[in-house]
Amino acid sequence: MAHTETSQKATRRDFLYIATGAVGAAGVAGMVWPFVSQLQPDASVLALSTTEVDLSPIAEGQIVTVQWRGKPIFISHRTKKEIEEARSADIASLRDPQPDADRVKAGKDQWLVVIGICTHLGCVPLGHQGAYDGWFCPCHGSVYDTSGRIRQGPAPLNLALPPYAFTSDTKIVIG
């Protein structure tokens, strides 16, 4: 009989230890949760993480600028002539060699989407300017072609490409 009482007391004591530990852990988690949740981005930051753009009003040959994460994004609806000029460039002669096909989405060659910040000192280039009718940075003279590749001037790299995807034939999501 004494053996059974000791087993029951030990079992009861074990249960009390486990229950006390569980309540304590829940209390600590309840105190820590507000601190952890305040580290999450708020709704305004999440809204800026992606930008949806309707391409249907952009006419052929037109360049439109939209904002994504506070950066200008150039969306160019390229003409057949602009696409041909971009494809016919001698890749080996480019400072930052990259074929036009790597700068556009397959099957959507008419749409070029680039971050509109000069890779030299962060200026914003002007569209349909320069010797290649792409972009021209008036601050220091960098010239980009219709594929956003650096052709002349001090800029070391092509205009950067943001992450984007087509959600339909006339809509893209940047980010």
Image: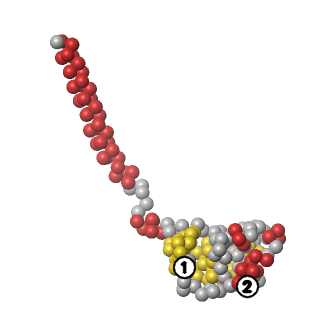
Q: Residues within 10 Å of mark 2 (few under 14, many from 20)?
A: few
What is the number of the mark on residue 75? Answer: none
Residue plotted at (74% across, 77% down):
86
Q: Is residue 101 above or below residue 83?
A: above
Question: Where residue 25 appears, x then y in whole percent?
Answer: 31, 39
Q: Which mark is residue 81?
A: 2
Quarter of the rendering occupied by the N terminus: top left
Q: Which residue is mark 1?
A: 170
Hey, which quadrant is residue 155 in on the image?
Answer: bottom right
Visible residue check, residue 143 = no
Residue shown at 76% from the left, 76% from the top: 87
The location of residue 12, given as percent across then percent down, is: 21, 25
Q: Are marks 1 and 2 in contact (CB under 8 Å)?
A: no
Q: Is residue 128 left or right of residue 8?
A: right
Instruction: Inspect the image, locate mark 1, and give the three-letter code of the amino acid beneath it.
Output: Thr
Residue drawn at x 42%, y 57% as measured from the top left: 40
